[in-house]
């Protein structure tokens, strides 16, 4: 238990250091239109959404196939 306090403190400091720039960027007022608004007006937002969906589907397919291969190898090792 005594060792967990310095680890917790370090984790909190790291999280705070990572979140401060994000909070600073969010707190500033937007002077230009948001990127999503501009993409939506030109109709390109659908292309962005489609690309993200394809990438996520590819990652999901890769993870499922990797899990199946690992399961098969684990069964072979157990036998």
Image: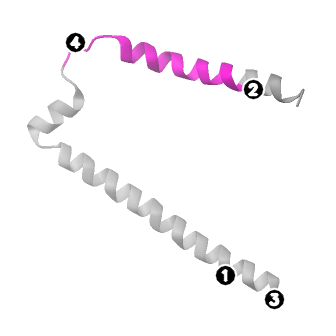
Residue 72 lies in the magenta stretch: no
Q: Residue 8: x, y in percent? A: 75, 26
Q: Which residue is mark 2?
A: 8
> Label 3 near label 4: C-beta < 8 Å?
no
Principal secondary structure, stretch drawn in magenta: helix
Residue 18 lies in the magenta stretch: yes
> Label 1 near label 2: C-beta < 8 Å?
no
Residue at image coords 81%, 89% = 79
> Label 2 near label 4: C-beta < 8 Å?
no
Marks 2 and 1, how far apart in space?
39 Å
Mark 3 burial class by Cα count in 10 Å: few <14, some 14-19, many 20+: few
Residue at image coords 25%, 15% = 30
Residue at image coords 40%, 56% = 56
> Label 1 near label 4: C-beta < 8 Å?
no
Comparing labels 4 and 2, the label whose residue is closer to the camera:
2
Q: Which residue is mark 3?
A: 79
65 lies left or right of 30: right
Residue at image coords 60%, 71% = 67
23 lies left or right of 67: left
Q: Which residue is mark 4?
A: 31
Under circle 2, the secondary element is helix
Under circle 3, the secondary element is loop
Q: Which residues are magenta?
A: 11-32
Q: Is residue 37 above or below residue 9?
A: below
Q: Which residue is mark 1?
A: 72
> Label 3 near label 2: C-beta < 8 Å?
no
The outermost residue toward the front is 1
Q: Residue 71: x, y in percent? A: 66, 77
Along the viewing direction, whichever of 51 and 17 lies nearer the viewer: 17
Marks 4 and 2, how far apart in space?
38 Å
Q: Residue 63: x, y in percent? A: 53, 65
């Amino acid at each position: 238990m005594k060792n967990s306090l310095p680890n917790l403190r370090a984790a909190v400091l790291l999280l705070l250091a990572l979140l401060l720039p994000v909070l600073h960027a969010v707190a500033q007022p937007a002077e230009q239109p948001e990127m999503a608004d501009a993409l939506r007006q030109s109709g390109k937002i659908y292309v962005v959404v489609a690309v993200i969906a394809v990438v996520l589907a590819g990652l999901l397919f890769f993870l499922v196939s990797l899990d199946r291969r690992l399961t098969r190898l684990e069964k072979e090792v157990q036998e």
